[in-house]
Amino acid sequence: MYAEERRRQIASFTAVEGRVNVTELANRFDVTAETIRRDLAVLDREGVVHRVHGGAVASQTFQTTEFSLDARFRSAPTAKSAIARAALQFLPESDGGLFLDSGSTIGTLAELIAERPQSRYWSVVTNSLPIALNLANKGLPEVQLLGGSVRAITQAVVGDTALRTLALMRADVAFIGTNALTLDHGLSTADAQEAAIKAAMVTNAHKVVVLCDSTKLGNDYLVSFAGIDDIDVVITDPSAPESFLTALRDREIEVVVAD
């Protein structure tokens, strides 16, 4: 595991548990205590956690940092591939409509959707420029890219034109990515315009399936776009804290752990 991915998991685990100690983290990630101390020092400087004697406590600040689409694809690629494969079970059995937002894990799912024989029966609506081009190049006959402005950092279409179009649409399933997921604030992201598109997809879908690797659990970003009660399914990876998954199940959310 790369240091960056380990630190993201440490940040998530700290956010969920509230407090962590060096010894437990060293055992969890099979590294030395000194490595964990260095990780905590980096996270403390970034404002993600607060160092305390023997470990760290969660920071209460809202995050605003965005990463490029390439950087997102490089983060936790194994987990994202497993999550995308697990999401296939929620595709319509025959014809149906899909919303695909602009998340990196959703992009991995789109690759798999293009390989399914049934894909020619599905109508796909997306605000992701790369996803729309990929699905069209693979020969899917019903792919609609929302119109509007393109955000360079995520290559996502946003704006009033896209929102007006979505207001007229309904989908059987919305596959949604997120920067963060907490029990109190639900799903959140850094940009208000992208949050608005995600919220519209959530509102206008019969079933909402959230693809969320474990590094995002327990974190909060600046703009909330859906509450816990808006979610039907959460798909994550085995590194997710069991206490968090239990809390989701207690709220009658279906939890799938992809491995």
Image (cartoon, rainbow, N blue to C red):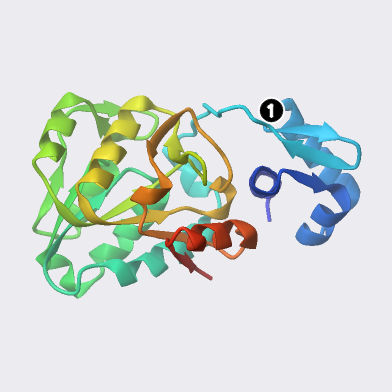
Whether residue 18 sits left or right of residue 203 in the image: it is: right
Q: Amino acid at mark 1?
A: Glu
Question: In the rendered image, which residue does mark 1 sit on?
Answer: 46
Residue 109 locus on image (x, y percent): 34, 59
Residue 222 appears in the rendering: yes
Residue 127 locus on image (x, y percent): 24, 40
Number of numbered callouts drawn: 1
Residue 226 locus on image (x, y percent): 37, 41
Give the quadrant of residue 113. Answer: bottom left
Residue at point 49%, 34% (across, down): 67
Whether residue 37 sits left or right of residue 256 in the image: it is: right
Whether residue 94 sits left or right of residue 31 in the image: it is: left
Residue at point 14%, 60% (across, down): 139
Residue at point 48%, 38% (across, down): 185
Residue at point 13%, 63% (across, down): 96
Whether residue 229 sits left or right of residue 215 in the image: it is: left
Q: Residues within 10 Å of mark 1 (few under 14, many from 20)?
A: few
226, above or below 94, in the image: above
Residue 241 locus on image (x, y percent): 64, 58
195, above or below 238, in the image: above
Foreground: 179 or 67?
179
Residue 241 appears in the rendering: no
